[in-house]
Amino acid sequence: MARVVLTPAAQRHMTRLPGGMLRRVNDVLQRLEKWPAVSGAKPLRRDLTGSYRVRTGDWRVVFRVAGDQVLVDAIDNRRDVYER
């Protein structure tokens, strides 16, 4: 079991989510606790090498793994999430 930790930026994103999407993102965060047995996690490339993403509808959860922690860096709409 991994421990899921949200960065301050990810916490700010969580506060702006609509209610239905908040439930879906919480489901993704619970799935991330089972890392590495997480279905749908895709490794990112180029500037985001070392990070992964899980999608839920048009929203993405971008995270990286450090030991037994899953560090969530961003939770945002697909059009904005990769612009960091």
Image: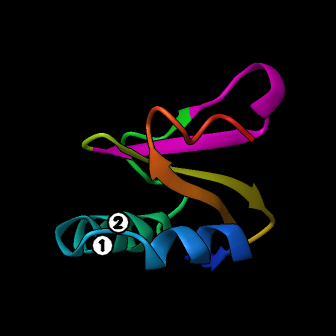
Q: What residue is pinned by disc 1? A: 22
Most distant residue in the front direction: 16
Q: Is residue 41 magenta?
A: no
Question: Spatial distance from mark 1 to mark 2, Cα to Cα?
Answer: 5 Å
29 vs 25, left or right, is: right
Q: Residue at x 36, y 69 (%)?
A: 17
What type is the residue that disc 2 sits on? Answer: Val
What type is the residue that disc 1 sits on? Answer: Leu
Q: Quadrant of residue 72?
A: bottom right
* x and y percentages locating residue 46 in the rendered image: 79, 19
Front residue of 33/9: it is 9
Q: Residues within 10 Å of mark 2 (few under 14, many from 20)?
A: many
Most distant residue in the top direction: 46
Q: Residues within 10 Å of mark 1 (few under 14, many from 20)?
A: some
Whether residues under marks 1 and 2 lie with C-beta atoms below 8 angstroms apart, the answer is yes
Front residue of 5/80: it is 80
